[in-house]
Image (cartoon, helix red, strand yellow):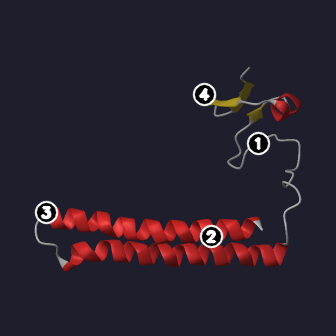
Amino acid sequence: MRGMRDRIGIVIGALVGWPGLAWCWWVVARDGDAPTREMLAVPVVMAAVTVVVTTWWVRHNQAIYRRKGERRAVPVAPSPYLADRRGRRLHFDPTVVRSAREVVVDVAEDGAKLYRVVS
């Protein structure tokens, strides 16, 4: 049921938003010099690009969902964390950092990453 409400909201937003954008462009074109074909084509091209990219992204995510199924948990990274992907050493207490609400990451002069918990 929620998916249907989301879709209705998206359709209503598109039906109101795109004409609103076109109207705003028309006001700009009308108040300036005579509108050129290029000036009027910009909102049309942007709308087309947005629709194409959004459609592609949704289809891409649907394909991932069909292939992998629903997520049931966040992937767990292997422990211990001794270095990042670039090979920099990491200095922290995993039990403290894992339960912290806010962590600040500093980089020391030697390139090591220092994790400290903010209270």
Q: CA distance from mark 3 to mark 4?
A: 55 Å
Is tag 1's residue or tag 3's residue first in the polypeptide sequence? Answer: 3
**Which of 67 and 95 lies nearest the eye of the viewer?**
67
Mark 4: few/some/many CA within 10 Å (<14, 14-19, 20+) = few
| Residue annotated with mark 3 | 32
Q: Nearer the viewer, mark 4 or mark 2?
A: 2
Is the residue under label 2 in contact with that under label 3 (CB below 8 Å)?
Answer: no
| Residue annotated with mark 2 | 8
| Residue annotated with mark 4 | 109
| Residue annotated with mark 1 | 83
Residue 80 figure quarter = top right
Is tag 1's residue or tag 2's residue first in the polypeptide sequence? Answer: 2
At x 80%, y 78%, the residue is 66
In the depicted structure, whether residue 34 falls above or below residue 91: below
Is tag 3's residue or tag 2's residue first in the polypeptide sequence? Answer: 2
**Helix or strand or loop: what does disc 2 sit on?**
helix
**Helix or strand or loop: what does disc 1 sit on?**
loop
Quarter of the N terminus within the rendering: bottom right
Is the residue under label 2 in contact with that under label 1 (CB below 8 Å)?
Answer: no
Mark 2: few/some/many CA within 10 Å (<14, 14-19, 20+) = few
Looking at the rendered structure, the kind of residue marked 2 is: Ile
Looking at the rendered structure, the kind of residue marked 4 is: Glu
Quarter of the C terminus within the rendering: top right
Q: Nearer the viewer, mark 3 or mark 4?
A: 3
